[in-house]
Amino acid sequence: MRSEIEGPVVTIDGPAGSGKSSTAREVARRLTFRHLDSGALYRGLTYALIEAGILEAEWANLAVKELHALGLTLESTKIGFEVRLTGQLLVDELRSVEVTDRVSLVARVPAVRECLIGLQREAGSGGGLIVDGRDMGTVVFPEAELKVYLVADLRERARRRLLESDREVFHDVDLAEEALALEERDDLDSRRAISPLKCPPGAVRIDTTHLSFEEQVSVIVELVNELTVRKRSSSFSGLDQGIT
Ligand code: CDP
């Protein structure tokens, strides 16, 4: 387990396509923190349910024990975490259309959230973590010292998602279709009863619509560095007080 001295847990939440995961990964790389993409866990469980042939109509009634029995694990690596299903590393499977279309339906099931919260907290137990998702600052790590909420205009988020995909060209109609899919997922994520998507109290809200990737990464790296300096100087002044 890593010690708290290695850095804080920093949460980055926000709507679909706001660039949380890519930003969090790069921030973690620059600070030599680890990165956890909590969405990958929800996607992994969705993939596991599809693979197990469990029908959508049954998802709401699944027990935590049954979900654990599917065999989804989070393996720690030097730079972050890998999602595995009965030992098999999941990467491309997590971003498939079948998974993306269903993940928000899975994520609103109470037993699903209960099943995954422990894995996420364990990942953050040693500090030095940049974690992104929907409820990182509100529910999973409410004590985090730095919380970021990333937003961007819907059209810009859709444009970025299409650029990330393999398509070399896309048209207005593709953009409208992607925007609709993102909007539907945001709607499900924000309206659900448990752990809805919302800006955590005390979070730094960053609108990235007009920021470059480099700019948004730098802003967050700077915020983490400021926090580290503040923590160091308060622990020094605590030391001074101890001596005098
Ligand atoms: O596509 P995008 O990267 O924005 O989403 P993701 O982070 O991969 O998350 C996929 C879905 O998982 C979200 O739309 C939510 O329904 C769910 N999720 C969640 O409920 N709570 C989290 N902490 C992370 C993801």
Image (tube, rainbow, N blue to C red):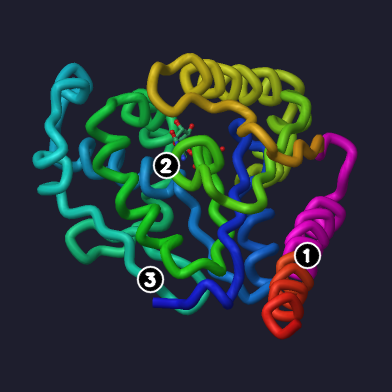
- Name the dominant secondary structure of the magenta segment: helix
Secondary structure found at label 3: strand
Give the residue type at disc 2: Ser
Q: Residues within 10 Å of mark 3 (few under 14, many from 20)?
A: few
Is residue 204 highlighted in magenta? no
Q: Residue at point 76% right, 80% down?
A: 240
Q: Choose the circle earlier in sequence order: 1 or 2.
A: 2
Q: Name the residue that disc number 3 marks.
A: 76
52 lies left or right of 32: left
Q: Amino acid at mark 3?
A: Ser
Amino acid bearing label 1? Arg
Mark 2, other Cα within 10 Å: few <14 / some 14–19 / many ≥20: few
The residue lying toward the viewer, choosing from 188 and 242, is 242
Q: Determine whether 16 is above or below 127 in the image.
A: above
Q: Position of residue 63 (x, y in %)?
A: 12, 32
Sequence-wise first label, 1 or 3: 3
Image quadrant for the C terminus?
Answer: bottom right
Residue to which mark 1 is pinned: 230
Mark 3 and ligand 1: say if the CB distance to the nearest ligand atom is below 8 Å. Answer: no
| Distance from the alpha carbon under mark 2 to that under mark 3 | 23 Å
Q: Please give the residue where the numbered disc 2 appears in the rendered image.
A: 96
Instruction: Compute the Cα span from label 1 to label 2.
Output: 42 Å
- Is residue 91 shown to the viewer in this render? yes
Question: Which segment is the magenta one?
Answer: 208-229
- The foreground one among 158 and 63 is 63
Question: Does the beta carbon at disc 2 come under 8 Å from ligand 1?
Answer: no
